[in-house]
Each structure stands twice: as structure tokens, then as C-alpha cells.
Amino acid sequence: MSTERIPILRMGSVLLVTIQVDMHDQLALRLQEDLTNKIVATSARGVLIDISALDMVDSFIGRMLGNIAAMSRILDAATVLVGMQPAVAITLVELGMTLNGIRTALDVETGMELLHELSCSQ
Amino acid sequence: MLIKAETLPVRTNDDVVHVRRATRNWSVELGFSLVDVTKMVTAASELARNTVIYGGGGTVRFEKVEEGHRRALRLIFEDQGPGIPDIGQALKDGFTTGNGLGLGLSGAKRLVNDFDIWSEPGRGTRVSIGRWK
């Protein structure tokens, strides 16, 4: 089993995750764990996940994204998902996953704006 | 009429990723639209994971078939695992014996044109999906 990890960048009070690899299940679980540890270690107020390079999101990856949003919320950080490809969005809804409870934005820039609004209103 | 076929192993998490890639390549070769490619890859990912987790590993056979002027991609997932006692229940949204969301089988069915399932307790499971161009 590989020890590959998805990098997490820190930009001020926001953690930025860009998913650029084929997400196998172990990698998704590892990201969940790494991200929650990093939120606590850096006292991050927001998490921005860029999935523009992901060409498919199945129920497992969708569940992982939902878990990350829920865990971040409990750790007092907001999560915004950005960059979902239209074909992925269509497929996800037909699959039966509506990603309830996850905030989304079209790109990194608007996602950052949304995160700032969210952390200012808290 | 069968034009082309290939069988791949579905035993590990890495195999699930390989199956996704192979499904993408076959779908593109058949000339599917991007949305249809994405649906087929997502359905294949759900079924491949089921084969690994619930079936204890198995195989997937890719088939390119032609009927008149129409072409289809068919994927047949097969395992010799414990089987599914109640297929009707397994096809319901939200039903799971694992720790997932219970969308794998029912979701995959919604993403394709043809769906067929055979399972016998103690003998295994075979799920076939197809999408027409």
C-alpha cells in the first residue's frame, strides 16, 4: 500500500487542499484524518477543497467530502468545495448524492470570498 | 455482436482505480459524451468497490457490442463471494450491510441504460451494466 498523501497548504487562517490524483479509498480516508489534525494544529477557520481536477466523484468520495465538512464544523472551521466539473455534478445528483450541508463555490477565488464572509459572520 | 473484450482483476483498492481508468478509456473509444463517460466511470467505481468489499474480490469483463448501427459498452462484475440474500432489498436506496451510504448498487443502476443482477447465497454475485451510444 502506498503512503501517498494529498498536500494541505496553509494560507493565513485557511487550509487549501487541491485534489489532483486518482482518489483511491485509502487516500480519501488519510486526507480526512490529516485535515482534521491540521485544523487543530493551525487553528484554521476555513477549509477550501478544490476538486476541479477530479473527473468523477462516487458515493465513497462524496461521503468523505461530507465527513470533512462535518468534522471541520465541529472543530469551528467552515468548508467550501470548489471547482466541481459539470459532468460530475450531473452524475452525483443522479447517483442520489446531493452533498447536503456542504457549501460550494465555482472557483477558488469565489470560494475564498465565501470563506472570509463565513468566518467574519461567526 | 461482440466486437472486443477484456477482463481485469478487481481485488484491491488500486484495482478499483484501474477499473475506473479502463472504463474511461473504453467509454471514450465508443464515442460517449463527457456526461455519459462520467456516469459509466462512476457506476463502474461503485460496482468495483462492492466486488472488493462485499464479494471478497473478483473480476470485471469489458465488452464492446454492436447491434445494427448501435454500439454499447457492457461491464460484467463477477465474484465468488457470499452472495446477496435479498436483491430487492440490496437495490433500495440507503440499504447497506457495510458502513457506506447504501447508494452503490441503486445509484449505479440509475447511471446506466441496462442493468442486470444475479446472485446466489454461497456462490457469488454477477452484475452487468450497459450504456448505448
Image (cartoon, coloured by chain):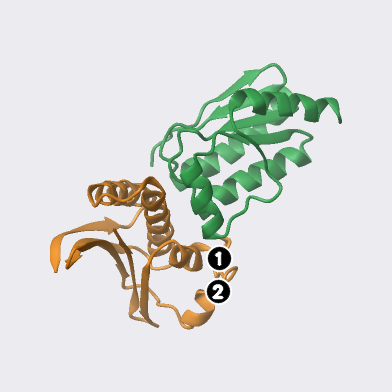
Chain colours: A green, B orange
Report in which chain the residue with disc 1 lies: B
Residues marked 2 and 1 touching at CB (< 8 Å): yes
Q: Nearer the viewer, residue B71 or B104?
A: B71
Secondary structure beneath dot 2 equals loop
Residue occupying image coordinates x 71% and y 45%: A70
Percent position of residue B114, x then y: 35, 70
- Asked where in the image residue A11 lies, by quadrant, the reply is top right
Q: Report the residue marked by disc 1.
A: B102
The image shows residue A118, relative to residue A67, as above or below, that is above
Residue type at tag 2: Lys
Q: Nearer the viewer, residue A76 or B66?
A: B66
State how far apart marks 2 and 1 are (Cα). 8 Å
Q: Is residue A97 left or right of residue A115?
A: left
Q: Is residue A35 left or right of residue A2?
A: right
Which dot, 2 or 1, sits closer to the camera?
A: 2
Percent position of residue B41, x then y: 38, 52
Q: Nearer the viewer, residue B62 or B30?
A: B30
Residue type at tag 1: Gly
Residue occupying image coordinates x 79% and y 30%: A118
Q: Earlier in the sequence, mark 2 or mark 1?
A: 2
Q: Is residue A2 visible?
A: yes
Residue occupying image coordinates x 30% and y 64%: B58
Q: Report the residue marked by disc 2.
A: B92
Q: Is residue A44 visible?
A: no
